[in-house]
Amino acid sequence: MIFASDKPRLRFGIRPPAVVWVPAALVAVAMVLPLVYLILRALEDGWAEIFEVALREKTLAVLFNSVVLAAVVTAASVAVAVPLAWLTARTDLPGRRVWATLAALPLVIPSYVGGFVLVSMFGPKGFAQEALAPLGVERLPEIYGLPGAALALTLFSYPYVFLTVRGALRGMDPGLEEASRGLGSGSWTTFLRITLPQLKPAIVAGGLLVALYALSDFGAVSLLQLDSFSREIYTQYRSAFDRTPAAILGLMLVALTGAILIVEARTRGRMRYHRSTAGSVRPYAGATIRLGRWRWPALLFFTGVVLLALVMPVGVLVFWLVRGLAAGEPLRLLWGATFNSIYVSGLAAGVAALSALPVALLAVRFRGRVAGFVERLSYLGYALPGIVLALALVFFGANFAPRLYGTLVLLVFAYAIHFLPQAVGATRAALLQVRPSVEEAAQSLGRTPSETVATVTIPLASSGIRAGAALVFLTTIKELPATLLLAPLGFDTLATSIWIATSGAFFARAAAPALLLVLASALPMYLLVIRERAK
Amino acid sequence: MVYSGRNEELVGPIIERFEEESGIDVEVRYGETAELAATILEEGRNSPADIFFSQDAGALGAVADRGRLQELPEDALRRVEERFRDPDGRWIGISGRARVVAYSTETLSEESLPHSILEFTDPEWRGRIGWPPTNGSFQAFVTALRLIEGEETAREWLEGIQANEPRRYADNLAALEGVASGEVEVGFINHYYLYRLREERGEDVEARNHFLSNGDPGALVNAAGIGVLSSTRNSAEAEEFLNFMLSEEAQQYFADETFEYPLIEGVQINEELVPLSEIETPNINLSNLDDLEGTLELLRETGVL
């Protein structure tokens, strides 16, 4: 089948069925809430204040820093993640399944832990400096500022690209690569001319998650001292108790997100990626590429990344724990908090996956302005720092939904708004690989649209939907600002336990919950990778 | 319900004791002081909170100025020195925290340190200073500096320190860590972090506190305090909570466990601490430190923030 036209082809009839557009519209309304809040607050002191804040020299510097940070972190993440994904999915790398799990795991390290570890390792008089001092190294390159913040964010967010690209590699029609090789192209040519172009949507989707995460994250930029939007917004709240400048900065961040989404839309283009033959996913059975001598540099690369992004932070946590135990601190295993963390993150993952489905369906199957707009809207909550989103929901919750305020419902709602794009991106990528004609066939055989979605679309896209849910789970479990303000009272999670310990300077006490957080996240991560074997 | 900007590890045990003794059930939301202040303002009259337990006077002032705190009973107010409470009686200090210069014992001795914070602008301190410019206690100190020494001196001081290329830290604790690890040699922070770090790490923390003298603004004593929300429906219970926190038992707890200064008479402080009466603190009322806006403006103009 050849698609020559750029015109959208409508699949479920002329208009999207109610089962798709009603939930999508509800999601869109939910997404607008933080924006409405920001506009209300920004206008409080009038337009003059808006111009005054927006045109401050400091604000422009912050804008510049944020743009550079997002660009550097995204580029570096793609550069690290694509080779890793390709090596684990296509080659005979020894222990590739183990490496795949290890390479995905840094995602579970909260940036406020990872950033701290980076400073204690590479800061002046850090572990690395002490270790190198006998060799005559008197000063390591400066860790504070852009290099350190970019390093920290890359190390702990490249897995977004790794997971989406690896998923796409596994879901890709192997026929194309087989044909390429059959026609005499080498591995390298096949990768460049066939594989890489097919991976573009996955790279862009993962890259977008990384870029926007870099904008919203507060932990890394505050510990590594880079004045980005999120740090400046926190500064406004923390020191001025003034919500108006913070809201103005928040709106500028929204505008920046919009600009990034426009760039993304241009790169995304209108290519189609589903296979033209069978509708079911065939596991990749093509020839595994033999690395030969190249496996040594490949293994070295993996070892380096895993050492920096995983072994180092976990090692420092274990060191804190042991030092604390040696000093007589009791070992506190927080089972209640662990359960709460898993429970609420699981709920958030489920709600986000369910809400993402109509949005992604609308975007993939009914390509139009409205559909595209709704999908882009879902990214809005993601780029905002958690505190902005949390205060928006405090405002709406306390004043318009007092019954829900302070309940788990509002907290899960906050998580879903915050992390929805992770689910939308993965679901969308999976839907792109599902051939619409299968859905058309189901409908011509008498299925209603909702039956078609339930019995055909969801099963075919299930790997993407589950991957999206897993991503939301992993990000939710380490979320802090919204959890602090919106969780029901007494609902301790691992993230809040870490915060309580570190903000009171009790590092030994922070180590146990931090390690539990890593363990609790490792399980879904393991399932995400191991599940593939069953296919 | 209490909104506590103070850490659970620090105030959790004393709140539990209050529950046991009074039979009143207390629910606590813990968070950062400033974020809880913003939350109270966002919630407006629908706030479920009865009490705001704040790290510093500034956040209480901000909430009070927007009419969200009610006047406290006279007999509670009278127990605490005037400088540690709101003149309009809308909040009251519970425990005191002194500004100090933490110094690295590896490279410095107490005798080699200046008596005034103003002397740190000397070029000899270039590259040796750490400070937390976004921290509330630090900013309160800058406000005090403006009040005591005047706007011009404060500006010159900030510019002078800036010229010495200080290292910026996220908070007091990070600055103390910087001093203890030798990243910097002196840090402008609050007094109690040192004692907590020593409790966890033992005596080998390579830092000590230096108290400035002669009413220097660098020796400002600020207070963590309590306000009762005007929208509370549990005024009686809130008052009982307030009275308990001002009781000898609770004050003794703060002195022993959090290494802060009790603010009522007749409580024994930790022997490692310099007594509050011996700190040559500047003679100003904390509620006069309300021009945070001006301080932020100055910090921005001098490029500190």
Image: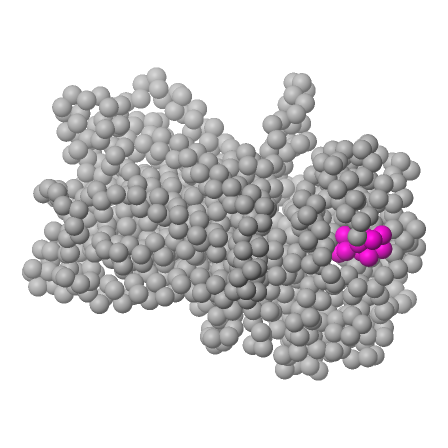
Q: x, y percentage for residue A306?
A: 47, 33
Residue at 60% x, 69% y is: B41
Query: What's the image's color scheme?
Result: one colour
A33 with respect to B26 (left or right): left
**Which one is in front, B278 or B14?**
B278
Which picture quadrant has residue A454? bottom left
Q: Main secondary structure of the magenta part?
A: helix
What's the residue at 85%, 55% (across, down)? Answer: B148
Pick whichever, B204 or A365, lies toward us. A365
Q: Is residue A42 left or right of residue A422?
A: right
Image: magenta residue range: B140-150
x then y, percent, for residue A2: 10, 42
Q: Residue at x 58, y 77 (%)?
A: B45
The quarter of the displayed image where residue B275 is located: bottom right
- The x and y percentages for residue B26 are 64, 73
Question: Which percent across, then down, holds residue A415?
Answer: 44, 59
- Check the image and name the residue furthest to the left: A445
Kindly identify the residue that appears in the image at 33 percent across and 30 percent down: A87
For the N terminus of chain B, give its image quadrant. bottom right
